[in-house]
Amino acid sequence: MKQGMLLFFLAGLLTLLPARESKWGWTVHRYINEQAVNYLPPEMAFFLSYQTFLRDHAVDPDQDDLPGQYHYIDIDVYPEFFNGTLPHKWDEIIALYGYNYVFDTGIVPWIIEQWSDSLTSLMRQGKWNDAWQVAAELGHYVADSHQPLHLTENYNGWMTGNGGIHSRYETQMITPYLTSLSLPQGQAEFWTSPIDSVFSYIDHLYPYVADIMAADDAASTTDPGYGSVYYSNLWQLLEGQTTDALHRAILDLASIWYSAWVNAGSPNPTAIGDESDVLIPADMSLRIFPNPFNPSTNIQFTLSQNSAVQIEIHTTGGRRVYTLFQGNLAAGTHSLRWQPSGMSSGVYLVTIRTEQFNFTRKVILLR
């Protein structure tokens, strides 16, 4: 994937209409991230120390300001998908359909590829505090791309008379059964080409779209008010497909983490430094507004005690591009204004470091 691809994604953000809302329920996102840790090979056992962090931050992409198009792809708007000739490479599909069309119809496969590349780079450089955050958010996008209704233009059923099915399927139906689901068999595998593997599981999961619409028709006939009978019948009709999608999400996420780690040279974080400070205290806060921004943004943070503080700006690949502040600050709330000069549009990481912890947030600069 080209280094400048993510910047290319962001070029027209200011002119885009608000993206649709589409995501698994938060309980499902946390479940997938937490379980995926258990399917890594023994040499990656250090991930277990951050299982809680990866679970808790699985929902961060639903709370940031990045575009909604990152969470889905309307794969069925591409005729080439059905005959097996759809380009997987970003440059090739842009050449075929144009940037605006591709972006507007969802770009989750290429976001997974980009986040995977960033994770590899951060691990290779030993930037583990940032790597854990990227790994958690990568899990979110992998999970989204395993929700069949994230793979279709008819994502909420309006085109087939199944209006509202998105929420009924991914939240109300699944949540009561989640804790009793079986777990998958297998282990993480190395993916030579993550983007090709993503499209491979999309091929497998897309037919479930028709199954979901048919099940909704049948279940709503028995209970038009969408009560308990409806959800019980919907689950009976879709248990197999849903369990398969969740099992694949867990194993595929583990495979993506594993592949990123192998590509980074299989580093061990314990050989780099103590990472026990990655979980921030409850009384710490970091707020960035506006975000996205141009030409400046405010970075507001609260310290629970007097601290030596360093605030740095990094690329998503972990390269430090600017030190915004370095010095001692008293306990309380502080605010800094950042007006970058000579920096390109793109996603950057704002990291605040003290003796007790490191904390990172994404920020988008638009030129």
Image (spheres, grey):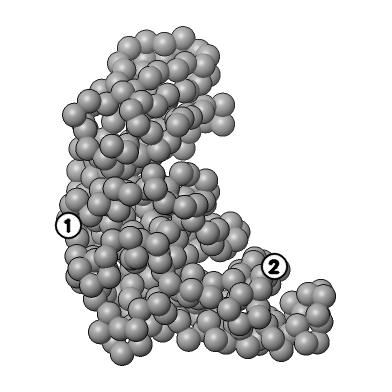
**Front residue of this view, candidates 300 and 11:** 11
Q: Quadrant of the C terminus?
A: top left
- Residue at mark 2 to residue at mark 1: CA–CA distance: 40 Å
Q: Quadrant of the N terminus?
A: bottom left
Q: Quadrant of residue 326?
A: top left
| Label 1 crowd bin: few (<14), some (14–19), many (20+), radius 10 Å | few
Q: Answer above or below: position of 339 versus 268.
A: above
Q: Answer with left or right where residue 265 lies relative to residue 357.
A: left
**Front residue of this view, candidates 65 and 251:** 65
**Front residue of this view, candidates 165 and 308:** 165
Q: Amino acid at mark 2?
A: Gln
Going from the N terminus, do you reach mark 2 or mark 1 first?
Answer: 1
Q: Answer above or below: position of 338 versus 121.
A: above
Q: Which residue is mark 2?
A: 172
Q: Residue at x 52, y 84 (%)?
A: 208
Q: Is residue 221 visible?
A: yes
* Image position, residue 266 (x, y; %): 21, 56
Q: Residue at x 69, y 86 (%)?
A: 217
Cβ atoms under marks 2 and 1 closer than 8 Å: no
Q: Answer above or below: position of 140 versus 360.
A: below
Q: Quadrant of residue 161?
A: bottom right
Q: Answer with left or right where residue 30 lies relative to residue 111.
A: right
Q: Which residue is mark 1?
A: 2
Q: Is residue 193 visible?
A: no
Secondary structure at badge 2 equals helix
